[in-house]
Image (spheres, rainbow, N blue to C red):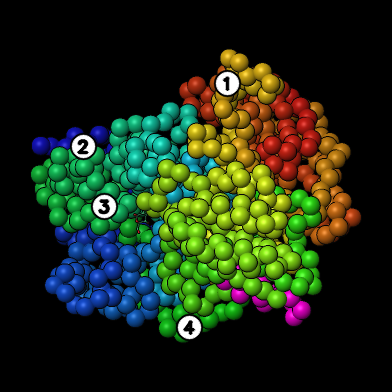
Amino acid sequence: MRHVWSAAALVLALGAAQVVAAEPVDIEQRIDRLLGQMTLDEKVGQLNQLSGKEFTGPATDKVRSMETEIRNGRVGSMLNIKGVADTRRLQALALQSRLKIPLLFGLDVIHGYQTVFPVPLGESASWDLEAIEESARIAAREAAASGIHWTFAPMVDVGRDPRWGRVMEGAGEDSYLGTRIAAARVRGFQGRQLGGVESVMATAKHFATYGAAIAGRDYNAVDMSDHLLHETYLPPFKAALDAGAATFMNAFNTLNGIPATGHEGLQRDILKGAWGFKGFVVSDWGSVREMVVHGYAKDLPDAAAKALVAGSDMDMESNAYASSLAAQVKAGTVPVALVDDAVRRVLRKKFELGLFDDPYRFSDPARERAALSDPRHRQAARRIAARSIVLLKNEKGALPLRRGLGTIAVIGPLADARRDLEGGWIVKSDAANLASLVDAVREQAGPGTRVSYAPGCDVACRDTAGFKAALEAAAKADAVVLAVGESWDMSGEAKSRADIGLPGRQGELFEALRAIGKTPVVVMMAGRPMIFENVAEQADAILYAWFPGSEGGRAIADVLFGAVNPSAKLPMSFPRSMGQLPISYQQYETGRPVRDLKNIVYKSAYIDAPNTPRYAFGHGLSYTKFAYSDLRLSAASMTPSGKLTLSFTLANTGPMAGAEVVQLYLRDPVASVVRPVKELKGFQRIELQPGQQRTVSFTIERDTLAFFNRKLEWTAEAGQFELMVGSASDDIRLRQTIVLDAP
Ligand code: BGC
């Protein structure tokens, strides 16, 4: 059956080709020349990506046949190959092919290559764009020296349902925070321009709406309004593109009935059309083939045709393009012009990376040795991890721990964890070389302090036999630290949880410690927000450390002892109960809002739980205090082409140096499409010495006030707007109304 492809798709593809004609003539001419020499099979080969996991094992028949494919120019890219030796060996095979087109080596370098940084959600809690960019730069430096050209990161999917395990890989629930972090990560991975040997190509993934899986179950279908798509889910992708993201990855999910991989509207109309993307789109692992399972394609050849026509340029591991695209072109189902456009996009990146001039330039043993042994990388990992740890609660002066304590007991299933500190997506796990939290507390406690340790139970915590030893250790201690949470493999891809409570009986361990009068300082590790109501109510102090990476143990100890004053803020709301999910601070006002908790009859409320989260988006405490005062505006109103400045004074009124992430929120109270009760519009991380104060300013312009109207046009409507400045989405300290004049 002939696949019906739209004329618009062809015009868009050709249009995009014209746009790139303005790029350096040299590369475009070289692409033309090369394309002119390529057979159809060689073209399809460039769009075929294979996993090379097998290459590290024995030379099986499969390995030999893959080697032959590479020599025959039937493979354009490999994933899961790493290290100078392997990348060189395979590149040498590609150079035996007729046209000697080098391979691209892609890998999931998600939060570090050898030096592991906090998982992306944790790192996002730093709200520190420089730190986030720096961690991506270090990951790129280590990966690039080991022969990697391309990372499948950043994941820029908005996530509002912590049941979905992959919230761990993103920047949380908020689109604005997501855009800023997406851009920082792309800049970090790619450097100023492609081609630097200390940079890798970035991938904005998963295009699009993968994070909105129904019921938080990974890979599940997505059903979403155009409004939510444009306003919330697409902006981080656009920001990644504007920051120069070289590639995009599409997604496993269907969106309103169409698989993202076969979605022409997303890939051709929006990405390559309206946004003018000149890089290439890679499918997700096997997602071309999965269109058959979805019931969108009748067989693999049909899936190949539908994916390519819809704008999916490279096929990751479906073997759909390699096995059937050429036949589809010959049958007239797929226009060769679309294949050419996809091939051009892939070749362009190979040229821009300089691979045609030196195919081995990234695989450099001396640079690999230097990058993988640079002590500054671990130092940065420690600094960034400490900045990502959120102080959720701190009462009765529980933290920082006093110096000179006689005994500190470090209790709990994660107290001596090493592998779990790293989280998922590890490339070169160095777990044996890490300091666990107990190790780090021993390092930092000082010579007069004894440190004892008892796990109580393992992470699954089904068995409480170990509680006794833990309680005995705690009974003898002057301070107790309890480390609980998830193991590294409980968050991430295919790690959705229907119950995001503390695993097993971990909560009972906390209660048992309380029962003997030893309320612990609680350290939590996880890749997602968890629910822990008893701990939230009864603990004096809680630190949320996520999976903090190679130096995570030391970073937690830095915060426990006050060497680092915590400054992180939650990038996702923490629910009180499963029934509140999905949850975000960015809600719409109902006609029946709850104004008074004592009167919820016929109001938009739960009769058995509050609407509010346990910890709100943007929440995070410090060991010092910050006072907000003296809000002023450069003018009370502005024109659509004008600007105004909001300023206020931030003072550190507490005893310690610290940093505050000040947050600017907006509400448009009356609009032609109702607006959320609060939208983040700006933030800054401000460091202040005790007693020091500073003027902080935000610029308000049309874009700050604009939104997508009924026709999905980006518009700002004249009228009043409320600006709110605060320390968290539920801790607004200053407010002011401004007016946008009619044009
Ligand atoms: C994930 C992608 C990843 C790819 C390659 C897929 O299962 O969804 O995010 O880049 O595998 O490992």
Q: Type of residue at label 3?
A: Gly
Residue at position x 28%, y 69% from top? 53
Question: Real-space Cα distance between discs 1 and 2?
Answer: 38 Å
Marks 1 and 4, how far apart in space? 60 Å
Looking at the image, tell me whether mark 1 or mark 2 is earlier in sequence order: 2
Sequence order check: which comes first, mark 1 or mark 3?
A: 3
Across and down, in percent, residue 424 comes to: 44, 61
Q: Which residues are magenta?
A: 436-449
Amino acid type, mark 2? Gly
Q: Say what amino acid the circle numbered 1 marks.
A: Ser
Task: For marks 2 and 4, give the CA distance.
Answer: 49 Å
Q: Is residue 533 magenta?
A: no
Q: Which badge, 2 or 4, is on the more N-terminal residue?
A: 2
Kindly identify the amino acid type of the residue bearing the numbered disc 4.
Arg
Which label was assigned to residue 295?
2
Q: Examine the residues drawn in magenta and state their main secondary structure.
A: helix
